[in-house]
Image (cartoon, rainbow, N blue to C red):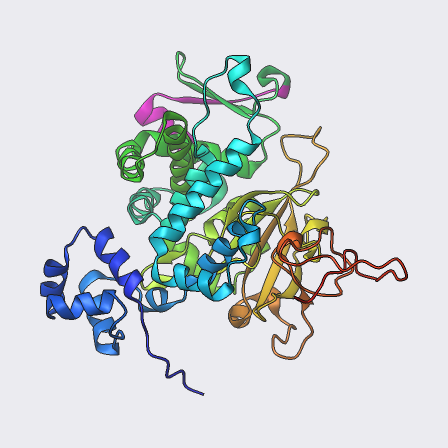
Amino acid sequence: MADNRKLYLGPKLRVLRRELGLNQTRMAEELGVSPSYLNHLERNQRPLTAQMLLRLANTYDIDIRDFVASTQEGAAHALGEILSDALVRDIGIAKDEVLEVAENYPGVSEAIARFYRALSDLRRLPERTEAGGSPAPLLAPIDWLRETIARAGNHFAELDAAAEALAVEMNDDPAVMQADLRARLKTLHGMGVQTVRADVLAGTLRHYDMHRRRLLLSERLPASGRLFALAYHLCSQEMAESIAAQVNRAAPPDEDSRRLAAIALTNYAAAALIMPYDRFRQAAEQSRYDLPLLRARFGVSGEQLAHRLTSLNRTGARGVPFFMAKLNRAGIVSKRFDGEAWPFARLGGTCPRWDAHDAGRTDRVERQMIETLEGRRFVTFFLALPSDGAPEARSRPVIALGCEAKHAGRLVHADGIDVEKDAPTEVGPTCHLCERRGCPDRALPPVTRALDLHGYERTVSPFPFRRV
């Protein structure tokens, strides 16, 4: 059945205008409409017509699919998580109120989210004033970086273009490329590269000696790690201006955030050099996103590959909109890219029913179809990472990739899954926010419901709770 709903996208249109640095009069002139009509659109007093969507796409080079896609649902979930905190839970804010704020006032929602993250950081801080320590920033650098990357869709077009231009001068074969990188570092930048014994670097995988202009690589680094290290240092030399400009545009709030952003964007550039956008996307589409094949063809690790797959957001040449997470065996997420949709809590953990926590094979891609409380289905894939470079590590991290089930036909690892008929694993956002009844894997009661305890019975599901 065709979807005949009218599109009211006023807040998204207002955000786009502000990002472009335009006032209403200027944008109305460029779109060929009156300022009053544009004002009505931004205030959701008029629906956005198909003709206006085409004008927006042609004038500002935006992807209509992305612009129309609902982001309010994710924002409403995040805002709902915040408002379930014990500090304000007793107010009992209705879900339709939360949705209304998320839909119509995205800036307010973002401001609340930032305040809450700052509050969460303060709750975790030790009593530093008594110890004489300096105050910590209200927004942790890692949280700031995650927000910055999310706003960019983990895609930085300028860096991709520069890396593609540089990659033209390199051989496609990973082994030969490594030799090309070594030669270019030596010839153009006077930088030597040496592989040394692990005990020489003492717990460090790579080290750049600035005085001798030598890059030292640990013998523990696998071939993918050595290739990436060489690409990183070449990009830091030849793409320094582009990277610095991107960092400045992100406006880091403090020096730690600035350094973290510079490292992250140099990593992005290195991945773009090893896996140039067009060639990598074509290989991914032709192989139907065969992870082991892509890893071998480009000479990268599972983690490097997963990162790159989440960055295929070039207008007119997009890949599958994957989300990605890196987890340890305790289920703690150390890295996350939300992609088009993230099925779990944005401010908490994941669900114990998600098999990513138990993935243990480094040589095989494991898979699982999951369904959220709202009935949205996702196909997810897991790959345990080898302990390269850290043999003493007791926890083997896992890389998880996933996307909405509607993309399953494009993925070789989803072959055999009938996304309509097969029974999915039912998951929740995270235990303390999940209202799924009868879950035997529950670790915490939902903060949104009162417990329903009786001495004369014990239910299979821990923490039984009331329906209302």
Magenta stretch: residue 402 in it?
A: no
Q: Residue at (51%, 17%) from the top-left corner? A: 129
Q: Is residue 351 left or right of residue 235?
A: right
Front residue of this view, candidates 125 and 364: 125
Residue 454, given in percent of the width and then of the height, sits at 84, 59
Q: Nearer the viewer, residue 326 or 341?
A: 341
- Name the quadrant containing residue 137: top left
Q: Is residue 190 magenta?
A: yes
Residue 236 position, x and y percent, is: 35, 31
The relative height of residue 163 versus residue 205 in the rendered view (above or below) is below
Instruction: Reply above or below: 290 against 215.
Output: below
Residue 136 appears in the picture as rendered = yes
Vertical order, 244 against 171 (above or below): above
Q: Nearer the viewer, residue 127 or 379?
A: 127
Q: What residue do we see at 42% from left, 43% from top?
A: 114
Displayed quadrant of residue 218: top right
- Residue 320 visible here: no
- Residue 60 x, y percent position in the rendering: 21, 61
Residue 35: percent from left, percent from top:
12, 66
Residue at image location 12% in from the left, 70% down from the top? 33
- The quadrant of the rendering that contains the C terminus is bottom right
Tell me the quarter of the image containing the N terminus.
bottom left
Q: For the view shown, which residue lies furthest in the front direction?
A: 91
Residue at x 36% of width, y 56% of height: 106
Q: Which residues are magenta?
A: 181-198
Point out the residue furthest to the bottom here: 1
